[in-house]
Image (cartoon, rainbow, N blue to C red):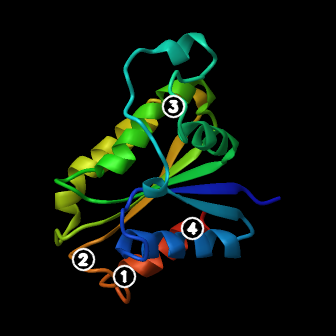
Amino acid sequence: MGKTVLVLMGSPRKGGNSDRLSDEFMRGAREAGHEAEKIYLKDKVIGACLGCLACQGTGGRCVQNDDMDELYEKIKAADSVALASPVYFYTWNALMKTALDRTVAIVADMTDKTFYLIGVGQAPSERYMATMIDCFRKYVGCFRAGDSREGGYVFGYGVDKPGEVEGTPAMGLAYEMGKSV
């Protein structure tokens, strides 16, 4: 039986480089027999975490009534979650960071999941992605008590304009990472 794969797309550009890499990841996952869905964060209303931690006393119910309610259910149901984002100032963009902060509401439900990172940026090598990789690993590390783990990451280096990632090694790597889900 296949797994359920959820891609959270943090890029504000549909059809951009992050989107194209995540499509290759999803293609690989589907060819391996898994179900894959992508959610564009830019199309959702997601407020910033208020830091009130009311969610911790209500079984994961946030006081805000926005589109995170839908995302909570999809994240909880997924076996694997891919976080796709362009690299802004060495880390996630605001769309992704806002959504990740809000997952504090479901921290108890983030068990037995595999997380993947898909990123693109103008920088020419992994050295410039170190902050984002570290943030990804620390985020996944928050859920290790529940057997959640890192599945891998892929970056498109030296890309900016939509489509520049096409034909780069990152496309094949994203596809193979998806097949390995």
Front one among 51 and 154? 51
Which of the 4 image quarters holds residue 5? bottom right
Question: Whole-Å distance between the Cαs marked 2 and 4?
Answer: 21 Å
Pointer 2 residue: 159
Quick check: marks 4 and 3 in contact, CB under 8 Å?
no
Front one among 72 and 142? 72
Residue 12 in percent (x, y) is at 36, 62
Determine the residue located farthest toward the top in the rendered image: 57
- Give the mark nearest the N terminus, 1 or 4: 1
Residue 58 in percent (x, y) is at 61, 14
* Mark 1 element type: helix
Quick check: marks 2 and 3 in contact, CB under 8 Å?
no
- Give the mark nearest the N terminus, 1 or 3: 3
Above or below for 170 versus 4: below
Foreground tag (2 vs 1): 2
Residue 18 in percent (x, y) is at 39, 69
Pointer 4 residue: 178
Q: Which residue does the image show at 42% across and 39% down from the upper left?
A: 100
**Mark 3: few/some/many CA within 10 Å (<14, 14-19, 20+):** some
Residue 9 shows in the view: no
- Give the mark nearest the N terminus, 2 or 4: 2
Q: Which residue does the image show at 37% across and 33% down from the upper left?
A: 48
Pointer 1 residue: 169
Front one among 139 and 9? 9
Foreground tag (2 vs 4): 2
Foreground tag (2 vs 3): 2
Question: Whole-Å distance between the Cαs marked 4 and 3?
Answer: 22 Å
Above or below for 24 versus 45: below
Question: Whole-Å distance between the Cαs marked 2 and 3?
Answer: 33 Å
